[in-house]
Image (cartoon, grey):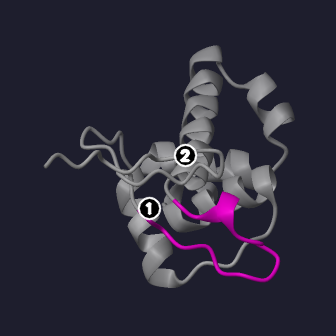
Amino acid sequence: MAGVGFLADDREELVRTIIRRSVGDFKMADDHFEALIEDLEEPHDKGRVRFALYHMVAITDPDTLLRLAPSRMSESYQKYERRVVTAFLTRTDYLKINPRTDAVTFVGGEACTSPFARIAEPEQTI
C-alpha cells in the first residue's frame, strides 16, 4: 500500500505541508506560491520518487518515519525541509505582515525581507 505514495509528485502540497507544520497556516495567492516553488527548484533535481517520498514523510509523523529511514534519507529530507522554511521566511513578506489576516507575498531571492534590517540609502555625491 505504501507504494501508492510513490506515484504522486505534488511539490506544491509538499511545500505547503512543510510550511504549515513549521510556521502555521498562511494565505498566499497561487501565482506567488508558484513563484516560490520555482525558486526552490534545483537544476540537478533528483526527480519524482524523492519528492513523493518527501511528501509521504511530511504528511505523516516525520520524526517517527525518519527514525526508521536510512540516515542519508533522513538528512536529505531535513535539509530540504530547512531549505523550504528558510526560502519562505526570507523570500516572502511573511515576517512583515500579520499572516492571520494578510496574504503572504513572494518578493524573490534578491529582496531583503528581514523586519530587523535597516537598509541605508546610498550616499549621494555632488
- Above or below — where is 79 with respect to 126? above
In this rendering, the label closer to the viewer, 1 or 2: 2
- Going by the numbered disc 2, the residue's amino acid type is Arg
- Going by the numbered disc 1, the residue's amino acid type is Ile
Q: Is residue 49 left or right of residue 114?
A: left
Q: Nearer the viewer, residue 105 or 81?
A: 105
Q: Is residue 69 left or right of residue 107?
A: right
Rendering quarter of residue 16? bottom right
The numbered mark, 1 or 2, whose residue comes first in the sequence reads 1
Q: Residue drawn 47% across and 50% down?
A: 112
Q: Residue drawn 36% across and 61% down?
A: 38
Q: Secondary structure at mark 2?
A: loop
Q: Which residues are magenta?
A: 92-107
Residue that protrudes farthest toward the top in the picture: 71
The residues bearing labels 1 and 2 have C-alpha atoms spaced at a distance of 28 Å
Q: Nearer the viewer, residue 51 or 22?
A: 22
What residue is pinned by disc 1?
37
Percent of width and height locating residue 21? 79, 54
Asked if residue 89 lies in the magenta stretch, the reply is: no
Percent of width and height locating residue 20? 76, 61
Asked whether residue 22 is in view, the answer is: yes
- Above or below — where is 46 with respect to 12? above
Percent of width and height locating residue 102? 71, 81
Q: Secondary structure at mark 1?
A: helix
Majority secondary structure of magenta residues: loop
Percent of width and height locating residue 57? 71, 45
Residue that protrudes farthest toward the front in the picture: 126
Q: Nearer the viewer, residue 2 or 84?
A: 84
Asked if residue 102 lies in the magenta stretch, the reply is: yes
Q: Residue drawn 30% across and 47% down?
A: 122
What residue is pinned by disc 2?
118
**Neighbour tally class for label 1: few under 14, some 14-19, many 20 plus, Cα within 10 Å:** some
